[in-house]
Image (tube, rainbow, N blue to C red):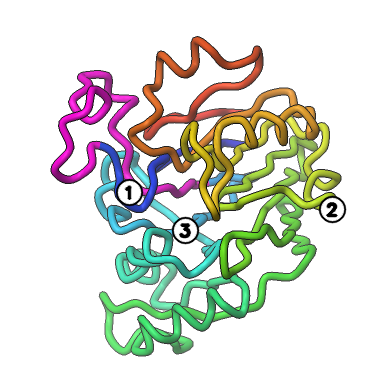
Amino acid sequence: MEVVFLGTGTSQGVPMIACDCAVCRSPDPRNHRTRASIHVVMDGLHIQVDAAPEFRLQSLRHRIDWIDLFILTHGHADHVAGMDDLRRFCDLLGGNALPVLSTDEGMGRVLAMFPYAIMDRPIVRGYAAFRLQQMPAVLDLPQGRIESTLLPHGGVNTLGLLFTEASSGVRFAYYTDCKRIPREAIALARGADLVVLDGLRPEPHPSHMNLDEALAAAAEIGARSTLLTHMTHFLDHQGTCDQLPSGIALAYDGLRITL
């Protein structure tokens, strides 16, 4: 299994508009964060999770050349706004609609923003077409299994995802944009090879886990390795990593991990 971090930042991104803080001015490329999304390759199946406003640029920068399946964790702008650029992958799929799996809230947002794309095939080549589907608790595929759980995130629920690759048995959990990890989500991810958690900033936030909350969740899950994502400019990459417990680090844009 391969995981590509296309973006690891918040809705404001880093550097942030009109900010001269040390992180926003940092020459360290790991402090330059576009909005959060990942690309997972599981036994050859290409799964895109979320489409940030920078999705087109992320795809070009990180050589995303194919998508079989798209999962939208929730309908907030920093995760859905780039979906129109999925149109190229409909071309590559032979002019067929791209399967889009999400929650009721996520599907409603896609329908509201992209009503012209809800169809079985694009109107013409070069247009987007989405086949909306409810994300099930368990999605069994020839290449492996994707399990989902709901994570509280302010007024909505985010999809937490656990990927299990058929050939290797490798397990990868992606829990972005959440205030806490419910017991059932902890149990689902426990002992995974890699877990990615929302870790917004040091200070508390009403709808995201802060650094201490993310570290507590990481300890309870007990993964072999844990990475934090969806980070603000309050977290300097190297300075924060130097203070984190063993086995825990900050993700960064462009990070590729083979499990």
Q: Earlier in the sequence, mark 1 or mark 2?
A: 1
From the image, tell me which residue sits under label 3: 50
Residue name at image x 48 percent, y 46 percent: 38
Between disc 1 and disc 2, the foreground one is: 2
- Establish if 154 lies above or below 229: below
Range shown magenta: 15-39
- Which residue type does callout 1 highlight? Ser
Residue name at image x 30 percent, y 65 percent: 85
**Residue 59: assigned label:** 1
How far across and down, in percent of the image, does residue 164 sit? 75, 45
Between disc 1 and disc 3, the foreground one is: 3
Q: Earlier in the sequence, mark 1 or mark 3?
A: 3
From the image, tell me which residue sits under label 2: 184
Q: Is residue 27 magenta?
A: yes
Residue 213 visible in the picture: yes
Classify mark 3: residues with Cα within 10 Å, few (<14), some (14-19) or many (20+).
many
